Image (cartoon, rainbow, N blue to C red):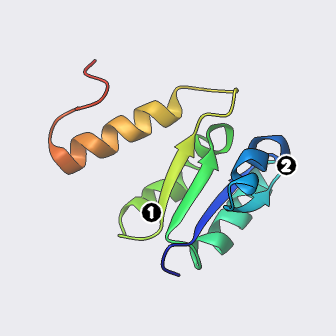
Amino acid sequence: MQGKMAVVGSAETITVFKAAGVDAFPVSDEKSARETLRRVARDYPVVFLSEEYAEPLHDLLKRFDEEAYPVVLPIPTGRETGYGEAFLKASMERALGVDILFQK
């Protein structure tokens, strides 16, 4: 499990990650994203998730956030909702006690 990374998202979004050697798992809707994320989370300590699927899966991400692994990171995909930035900001503030990146 050590050092493995995965990306879950639409086929066009994950292509660049696949080219970089990250294991890629294409999904087409919220249901397949939820199922794939649950499966992938068992084997990968770091999982990137397309932002358009991160917001609808907020409940699942909150559960993952309670454990050390996997670390699930929403990534921008061209269909940004602002969720990824807000999620990262809240996680940093909880871990560090201060917003060191966004300062908004």
Residue placed under numbered mark 2 in the picture = 28
Q: The residue under label 1 is which amino acid type? A: Arg
Find residue 21 and report its horizontal and vertical position in percent: 69, 62
SS at mark 2 in the image: loop
Find residue 34 and report its horizontal and vertical position in percent: 69, 59
Find residue 103 and report its horizontal and vertical position in percent: 25, 21
Which residue shows up at 35% across the image and 70% down it? 68
Q: Residues within 10 Å of mark 2 (few under 14, many from 20)?
A: few
Q: Quadrant of residue 56?
A: top right
Q: The residue under label 2 is which amino acid type? A: Ser
Q: Which mark is residue 63?
A: 1
Which residue shows up at 56% across the image and 60% down it? 47
Tag nearer the camera, 1 or 2: 2
Q: Which mark is residue 48?
A: none
Q: In the image as oriented, which residue stretches furthest toward the top?
A: 104
Q: Quadrant of residue 66?
A: bottom left
Which residue shows up at 44% across the image and 55% down it? 62
SS at mark 1 in the image: helix
In the foreground, 77 or 58: 77
Position of residue 21 relative to residue 39, above or below, is above
Left or right: 68, with 4 as reference point: left
